[in-house]
Image (spheres, rainbow, N blue to C red):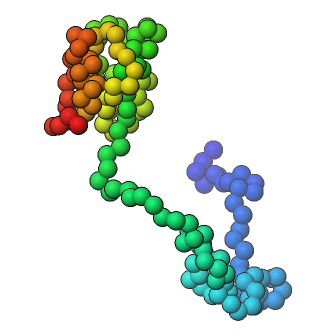
């Protein structure tokens, strides 16, 4: 096979319908747009337009606030770590980083920071390195002989 012999499969490309090419084409005169009106003109943008009725997005109440500066965290709870130890995925006293937590499937993959939270009970000591952790989680880990190292500047 040579480059000049290459061609698409039969029916892979459909010819564009040529509009406004005379009455015999079936798409002459108004080119399938009907007669007059806003939709017959170019540059029409009718997303959300409901014929003069108040659009749904304007009828619904607006509540709350989404900060542009919010930080989405991947969250890991102490109870989930303990469950992984009991399952055999983690060893007691092992060193955990955000990468190892991600590869073990304990937190989702991604580049967002990992935050350690105190939900659940941790019975076995671990050395954990994460971006941030709650004060209750840090106290719970240190109480059983583990250590939490924060890579971020503040623990909040």
Query: Is the residue 24 above or below the residue 69 in the image?
Result: below
Tell me if 95 is positioned left or right of 19 in this view. Answer: left
Residue drawn at the location 27% of the way across and 26% of the way down: 136
Query: Is the residue 44 above or below the residue 129 in the image?
Result: below
Where residue 142 appears, as percent x and y from the top left, is 22, 16
Where residue 4 appears, as percent x and y from the top left, is 60, 54
Residue drawn at the location 38% of the way across and 56% of the way down: 66
Count of number-bearing discs: 0
Residue drawn at the location 38% of the way across and 58% of the way down: 65
Q: Check the picture and name the quadrant holding the N terminus.
A: top right
* Closer to the camera in the image, 61 or 11: 61
Which residue, as the protein is rendered here, is positioned at the far left? 153
Instruction: Decide if residue 98 is in sight here.
Output: no
Where residue 122 appears, as percent x and y from the top left, is 35, 15
Image quarter for residue 155?
top left
Instruction: Decide if residue 12 is in sight here.
Output: yes
Where residue 100 appears, as percent x and y from the top left, is 34, 21
* Closer to the camera in the image, 120 or 153: 120
Q: Check the picture and name the quadrant holding the C terminus.
A: top left
* Closer to the camera in the image, 15 or 60: 60
Query: Is the residue 6 above or below the residue 105 in the image?
Result: below
Image quarter for residue 115?
top left
Residue drawn at the location 64% of the way across and 87% of the way down: 38
Tell me if 10 is positioned left or right of 55 in this view. Answer: right
Tell me if 67 is positioned left or right of 59 in this view. Answer: left
């Amino acid at each position: 096979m040579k480059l000049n012999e290459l061609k698409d499969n039969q029916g892979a490309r459909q010819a564009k319908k040529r509009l406004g090419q005379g009455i015999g084409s079936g798409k002459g005169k108004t080119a399938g747009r009907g007669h007059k009106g806003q939709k017959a003109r170019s540059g029409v943008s009718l997303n959300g337009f409901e014929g003069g009725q108040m659009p749904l997005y304007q009828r619904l109440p607006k509540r709350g606030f989404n900060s542009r500066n919010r930080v989405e965290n991947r969250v890991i709870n102490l109870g989930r770590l303990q469950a992984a130890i009991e399952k055999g995925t983690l060893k007691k006293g092992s060193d955990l980083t955000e990468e190892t937590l991600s590869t073990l499937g304990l937190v989702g993959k991604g580049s967002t920071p990992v935050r350690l939270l105190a939900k659940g009970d941790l019975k076995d000591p671990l050395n954990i390195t994460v971006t941030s952790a709650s004060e209750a989680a840090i106290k719970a880990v240190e109480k059983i002989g583990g250590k939490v190292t924060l890579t971020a500047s503040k623990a909040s």
